[in-house]
Structure formats: C-alpha cells, structure tokens
C-alpha cells in the first residue's frame, strides 16, 4: 500500500477560491442565520445525549482505544477482512486512487450492462466523484438519501458530511422539487416534500441494475459490512438491485463485532443526537441458494487515496481514527460561519482540514490548516479523541517549512516563502540578543515613518502597523 504520488484530477478543488467563497457566505446574513440555527440545533441534540460528563469521557476513551487498536493492526486486519469476505462470497477490489475506484465500479456496471445505479449515502463516493465518472460512462447514478437527492437535483455538492443539504431551506427544496420532478405542485410542507422524494425513489429502487453504498464498519473476524442509516434507502440499495457495490476507505475496519457497540453509540449520539439510528444493516454476503431476496453479487471496493500516507506517520495516523460523525464541524466557529461549500473539498470543516491534505496534497490545501482559530472545540467534542488542533499545527508546519528531501507528505513546503522565512529568522536572531533588541527598537521608534501604509491583507480592514514613536523603556526612564 504505497501513498499515491500522482495528484488525480478532481472537478471540485479547494485551490485559491477559499477566501472569496468564505466572504460570500459571511456577507449573506440569511445563509449565516440558517447555518447558525442548524448548528445550534445539532449541538443541543448532541449535548442532550451526553448528560453525564463522566460517562461521555469514559466512552470517548474507549472509542479512541478501539480505533487505535484496530489501526495498529490495520495491515493484518485488511488481509483477514479480505479472506473472510471472500469466504462469504463478497468480491474484494483494491483501489489506490479515485480513478482506479471509478474504473472498478463502472467496469462492474458495464459488465452487467447497467443503465441505472441507485446510491445510498457514501462520502467516499463523493470523494472519488463517482457521479461525474458515471455520467461520462453513460450510467445514471441516482442519489437515494434525501439530502443527497436534494443536492443532486440542485447540481451541488453536500455541504455537511451527515446533513448534505443543511444549507437549503424548505422553500428552496419546494421550488427545486416543483421545477425538477414532473407533475409536482409547489409545497413547502416538509412531510409532503419527503413523500414526494420517497415516491420518486421507490420506483427507482425497483428499476436499478446496481445499488451502491458506503460502509461504516467492516468487521474482519466475520467478514461483515455494517451500514448505519435512518431512511431505509441504504437497505433498499443493498438488497433490491441484483448487484450491490460497497465502497469504503481502508481505515473503516474493526477486528471484532464487539468493537462496534461503543463506536456505534458514539457515532449516532455525536452525529444526529440519536440514541440509536433507525437502521443498522449487517451485510454478510450475496443471496444464497433458496433465498428469495438479496443481491446476486456483492462487491467491496477498498480505497486508499492518501490514507497510507497518513498511516505511515504515527501522529498523522490519528486522522484515520475518524468515524465521520460531523460533530467537529457542528462545533467549529469557522465552519458554522462559512458552511461547507466554502472549503471546496469533499470533507469540510475540521475533519476536512486534516484529511484533505492526504487526499489532495498540500499544494492544493496548504491554506486550509490556517483557517482555524485553534480554539480546540473540535478536539473536545470528537468522540474518538482525535487531537485535531495538534494535527492542524503539524500540517501548518509541513506546509510552511522549507521543502526538504523525503517529505512525509505530498506537497510538503508548498506554502513556503523565502522572504517571509528570512524575516522570521532575522526576528529570532534579534530577539536572542538584548543589545540587538535595544538597537532594533531604537531604530524602529526613530524611523517608524518608513513603515509602508499598505501592508497586504492586514491593512484591508486595519490601520497600518507602526512602531510607537517612543519605546516603553524610554518612557519609564523619563518618569524615573
Ligand atoms: S474528526 Fe472526530 S468529530 Fe470530526 S467527524 Fe471525525 S470522529 Fe467526528
């Protein structure tokens, strides 16, 4: 499992537009208000699930230990998982890059002459931009999770990993359905809107040739794929079509079934403030002889896409503990103000900032780690205790330190600037010597008129920085 060296071509790159996209949201009071309301709602639901801080801390420690234990054994668990899945009749495919994953999935679709694929919620399928690839191959990929269906109708990307359409109001959804679903009258009644979506999708489950799903936990000892969901669409995708293809990152593995209950409890309570999800699916193979339903073929695609790069470094490996609950996003003062689309990555918010550099390289994501106040809220709520602020500091260091041979991360040093670095080195040198420091402050106070009036982004909203005309030591001397 080597870290991918070649950046793949994504259609939705973070690049330089982050500041402009963020400003657009910050300047839109309506969007800000609706994000704030949604995040407050999710935060209070989570808080209500964990009234006892001692229980919460004990469970988080257990969650952390389980994830670290399983990551510690990842190579051997992957071998065990493949062997037990194969024994159960599930075909396993390995993909190093998004392109390879798309080729595998679309190859399977073409083998079965598939025209329609129904998709359950899968952030990994967003990560590989499967819908784009399917469209190019002439295959209809229809999202069946209600939030994903809404963003697909709007030709958008999810703005939250758990609530993809959280940026949309019911009026916007009503308009979208009215304009895009044949024969639908405008209604902003939420129950009616859900019913409209259900009616459209139910037909499609029966028509679809292939069903695609994500995986929340893959159990190595039994060869079982577990799927957590609330709408029942995951169960439909994985049982109604003749072929089921599951896709997941290589890190979603646990050794034992016993590891799941604590992680499951942390996931649902942290994500949506639910004690337990409506459905918990355990997939252990295709339809057997004599069984009346279930897919005839089940496939699992295991994706790397930079995960082995994170895995190779003991500190960065903690990124892979993530169970994708979204709690760090809901509590992040940056995410709650700018929403998910501003980031320009599949995974926004704190988790996006620490995982995206491994997927896309630091060249494309160098500034993401700096878009944080380092308040620590993300690390405090993370149910598996990922030290997100520490990882952000590490990524800043990797991005902005001088490029060197054999870097840990693709794109190391991408944000490095020789002039800025020289200024900081000079600053450190002056501060180490009291005599030099006195001289520098004396020169600064006498020649403060030399300071430029334009000082980059600083002066776009602030007055220019200028040393005081008199040093503190001079003022104290005068008073003495
Ligand atoms: S980093 Fe932690 S809080 Fe954020 S999505 Fe992952 S598990 Fe949840």
Image (tube, helix red, strand yellow):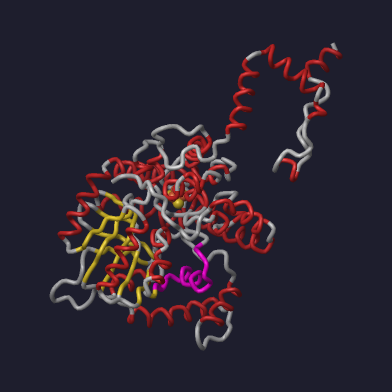
- Which residues are the magenta region? 141-158
Number of marks drawn: 0
Report the side of 153 relative to 90 (left or right): right
Residue 409 lies, in percent from the top left, at 42, 40
**Up-down: is 187 above or below 108?**
below
Of 236 and 119, nearer the camera is 119
Of 456 and 231, nearer the camera is 456
Of 98 and 253, nearer the camera is 98
Residue 469 lies, in percent from the top left, at 83, 24
Q: Quadrant of the C terminus?
A: top right
Q: Is residue 371 visible?
A: yes
Q: Residue lying farthest right?
A: 478
Which residue is at 34% across, 39% downward? Answer: 312
Q: Is residue 154 magenta?
A: yes
Q: Is residue 133 magenta?
A: no
Residue 376 lies, in percent from the top left, at 54, 41
Residue 64 lies, in percent from the top left, at 37, 43
Which residue is at 53% across, 58% downward? Answer: 42
**Up-down: is 62 above or below 419?**
below
Which residue is at 56% across, 82% downward? Answer: 178
């Amino acid at each position: 499992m080597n870290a991918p060296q070649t950046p793949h071509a994504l259609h939705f790159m973070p690049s330089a537009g982050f500041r402009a996209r963020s400003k657009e949201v910050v300047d839109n009071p309506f969007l800000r208000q609706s994000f704030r309301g949604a995040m407050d709602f999710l935060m209070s639901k989570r808080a209500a699930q964990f009234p006892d801080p001692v229980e919460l801390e004990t469970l988080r420690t257990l969650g952390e230990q389980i994830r670290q234990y399983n990551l510690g054994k990842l190579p051997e668990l992957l071998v065990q998982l493949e062997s037990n899945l194969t024994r159960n009749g599930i075909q396993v495919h390995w993909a190093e890059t998004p392109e390879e994953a798309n080729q595998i999935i679309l190859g399977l679709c073409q083998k079965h002459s598939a025209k329609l694929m129904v998709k359950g919620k899968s952030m990994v399928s967003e990560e590989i931009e499967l819908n784009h690839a399917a469209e190019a191959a002439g295959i209809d990929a229809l999202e069946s999770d209600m939030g994903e269906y809404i963003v697909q109708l709007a030709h958008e990307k999810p703005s939250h990993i758990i609530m993809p359409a959280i940026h949309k109001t019911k009026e916007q959804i009503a308009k979208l359905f009215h304009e895009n679903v044949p024969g639908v009258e405008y209604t902003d009644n939420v129950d009616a809107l859900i019913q409209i979506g259900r009616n459209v999708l139910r037909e499609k489950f029966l028509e679809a040739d292939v069903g695609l799903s994500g995986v929340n936990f893959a159990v190595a000892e039994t060869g079982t794929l577990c799927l957590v969901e609330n709408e029942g669409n995951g169960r439909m995708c994985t049982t109604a079509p003749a072929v089921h293809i599951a896709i997941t990152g290589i890190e979603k593995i646990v050794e034992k079934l016993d590891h799941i209950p604590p992680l499951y409890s942390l996931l649902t309570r942290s994500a949506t403030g639910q004690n337990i999800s409506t459905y918990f699916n355990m997939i252990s193979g295709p339809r057997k002889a004599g069984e009346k339903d279930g897919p005839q073929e089940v496939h699992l695609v295991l994706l790397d896409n930079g995960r082995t790069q994170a895995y190779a470094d003991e500190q960065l490996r903690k990124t892979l503990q993530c169970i994708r609950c979204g709690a760090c996003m809901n509590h992040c003062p940056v995410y709650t103000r700018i929403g998910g689309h501003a980031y320009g990555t599949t995974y926004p918010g704190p988790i996006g900032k620490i995982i995206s550099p491994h997927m896309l390289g630091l060249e494309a994501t160098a500034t993401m780690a700096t878009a944080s106040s380092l308040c620590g809220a993300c690390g405090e709520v993370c149910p598996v205790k990922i030290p997100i602020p520490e990882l952000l500091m590490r990524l800043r260091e990797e991005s902005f330190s001088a490029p060197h041979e054999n870097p840990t991360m693709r794109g190391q040093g991408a944000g490095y600037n020789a002039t800025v670095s020289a200024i900081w080195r000079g600053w450190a040198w002056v501060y180490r010597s009291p005599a030099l420091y006195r001289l520098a402050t004396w020169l600064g106070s006498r020649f403060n008129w030399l300071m430029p009036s334009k000082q980059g982004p600083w002066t776009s909203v602030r007055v220019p920085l200028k040393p005081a005309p008199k040093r503190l030591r001079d003022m104290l001397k005068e008073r003495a």
